[in-house]
Amino acid sequence: MIVKHLLIGLLGLLGGTLLSGSELRADHNCASQTHDGLSYTVCTAVLGEDDLRVFHRDPEGRPFGSFAALDARLAERGEQLGFAMNAGMYHPDRSAVGLLVDEGEEQARLITNPGPGNFGMQPNGVFCLTEDRALVVETLAFDADPPSCRFATQSGPMLVIDGALHPRFLVDSDSRFIRNGVGVAPDGQTVYFVISDQRVSFHEFGRFFRDALGTPNALFLDGKVSKLHAPDLGRSDGGFPMGPIVGTVHTR
């Protein structure tokens, strides 16, 4: 991981403003930031500048499963994967657990009922990319007034809900995992994708989005299969096949 410290004047390159007291190290879209003594890798996309998409299956209907497989398919179209991470939970056959929208087409339906596991820990939510805005919306609010999403993925639990942490998060929880999630800045244009660099609790992870990144709403993506693809950091996590993937795309 690149550990070159940036001067304060370079923070604008990241697409967001970081609170004083946080240590920042960066290369292009991805940076390492510390908060409350814990380290996180933050990858920032700015709509209108970055081509951000959600991926799941190739044209033959097969889940991509890995960053390498997705990048190889993009290369056939003269494109390449920028940064990327897993974009929500999935069944053993790698189908999405909840809502999945790809290029405006619904691939899996919205799940509104509570259930077991992290996904069913309501309130959960949806990450949605419209034609001009990024949103993290609580599931029942999404169901009541669905936005027109070009891309969307549902996961849970919500980490931050209108500026408040999820009510079931415990300060002293001993449930700690490498976790990843997504939050949207108040401008609706700046999107932060975060993966912890060590095991963290839900409470610590939610506080990072709320207090360090200032996102009024943020969504947990996963905590046992969390992976990051960040070529500029020399990182592309492998391991078990993934379900949905979210990432940026560049022209070769």
Image: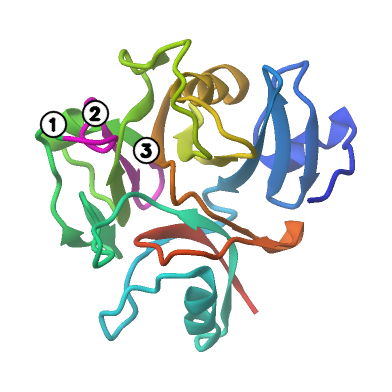
Which element carries disc 1, helix, strand or loop?
A: loop
Quarter of image, res 155: top left
Overall secondary structure of the magenta section: loop
Which element carries disc 2, helix, strand or loop?
A: loop
C-alpha gap between disc 1 and disc 3: 22 Å
Coordinates of residue 39 in the picture (x, y in percent): 69, 32
C-alpha gap between disc 3 and disc 2: 20 Å
In the image, taking residue 197 as reference, residue 52 lies left or right, namely: left
In the rendered image of this protein, does residue 75 appear above or below residue 54?
Answer: below
The front one of 146 and 174 is 174
Coordinates of residue 59 in the picture (x, y in percent): 30, 83
Q: Are marks 3 and 2 in contact (CB under 8 Å)?
A: no
C-alpha gap between disc 2 and disc 1: 6 Å
In the rendered image of this protein, does residue 133 appear above or below residue 131?
Answer: above
Picture residue at 25% right of the left edge, 80% below the top: 61
In the rendered image of this protein, does residue 105 appear above or below residue 45?
Answer: below
Residue 135's disc number = 3
The front one of 247 and 47 is 247
- Report the span colored magenta: 116-135
Residue 121's disc number = 2
**Dot 1 amino acid type:** Pro
Residue that carries the numbered disc 1 in the rendered image? 114
Pick out the residue farthest to the bottom: 76
Question: Does the magenta-highlighted stretch encompass residue 13?
Answer: no
Picture residue at 74% right of the left edge, 62% below the top: 234
Q: Quadrant of the C terminus?
A: bottom right
Q: How many marks?
A: 3
**Dot 3 amino acid type:** Leu
Q: Residues within 10 Å of mark 3 (few under 14, many from 20)?
A: many
